[in-house]
Amino acid sequence: MNIRSYGTVDAERQQAMSGLEFVQGLADGTLPLNTIAQTLGYDVVEAENGRVVVTLVPTNAHLNPAGTVHGGLTATLLDSCMGLAIQSTLDKGISQTTLEFKISLLRPVTPETGPIKAEGKVLNCGRRIGTADGRVTDATGRLLAHGTTTCLIFPT
C-alpha cells in the first residue's frame, strides 16, 4: 500500500497516461492527490471507466456559521467525482475542465452524519463535451445531495 501524497502530476507524465490510468493512480495512491483534497480531507477511493468515488468524514473544520457542513465542501466533492469520471474515459493526451455544474443540497451534513461518499458517473462523453451526474450519500445510502456537470474536453 502506498502512503498518500499530495501535489500535482507534471504535464509530461499526465500525457503519457490514459484518463483511466491517471484516475486509477489517484485512487490507488501511486499518483498524488491535489492539495485541495489534503486541505479538505477527502480521498479518491474508486476509479473505473466512467465512474469515480470520493469519500470524506465531515468534521467541525467543515462547518458554516449555522453549524452544518458548508455547501461548498459538498460542491467540491461533486465537482471532483464528476470531473474525474469524465477524465477516466479520455485517451492519452486529452483532458477536461468543468464548464458548469449544478448541485442540489437535499439534507444537512454535520460531523454526526459520519462518512459520506460522492459517486460520479458519466452520462455522455463526446469529442468536445462530456456530461456526468453525481450523488452524495451517507453510510446508510441516504441521498444528501446530487448534481450534474458539463465539461470541456481538449487536447493537452
Image (cartoon, rainbow, N blue to C red):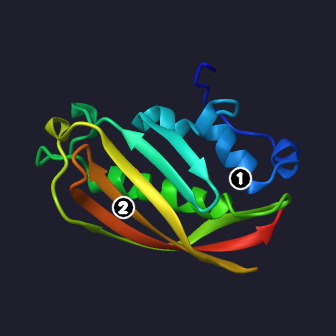
Horizontal placement of 28 versus 12: left or right?
A: left
| Secondary structure under the numbered disc 2 in the rendered image | strand
Figure quadrant of residue 27 = top right
Q: CA distance from mark 1 to mark 2?
A: 20 Å
Q: Position of residue 45 (x, y in %)?
A: 51, 39
The amino acid beneath tag 1 is Leu
Q: Is residue 108 visible?
A: yes
Figure quadrant of residue 131 = bottom right
* Residue placed furthest toward the left: 66
Q: Position of residue 40 (x, y in %)?
A: 41, 37
Q: Earlier in the sequence, mark 1 or mark 2?
A: 1
At x 80%, y 41%, the residue is 10
Figure quadrant of residue 145 = bottom left
**Residue 127 badge:** none
Horizontal placement of 71 versus 3: left or right?
A: left
Horizontal placement of 135 versus 90: left or right?
A: left
Residue closest to the eye, 34 or 55: 55
Q: Are marks 1 and 2 in contact (CB under 8 Å)?
A: no
Query: Tag 1: Cα neighbours inside 10 Å, few (<14), some, or many (≥20)?
Result: many
At x 29%, y 53%, the residue is 137
In the rendered image, which residue does mark 2 sit on?
135
Relative vertical location of residue 26 with respect to residue 18 in this rendering, above or below: above
At x 66%, y 43%, the residue is 24
In the rendered image, which residue does mark 1 sit on?
20
At x 68%, y 65%, the residue is 96
Q: Where the N terminus falls, by quadrant?
A: top right
The amino acid beneath tag 2 is Arg
Q: Position of residue 62 (x, y in %)?
A: 27, 39
Q: Is residue 33 visible?
A: no
| Secondary structure under the numbered disc 1 in the rendered image | helix
Q: Position of residue 74 (x, y in %)?
A: 34, 54
Relative vertical location of residue 141 with respect to residue 147 in this rendering, above or below: above
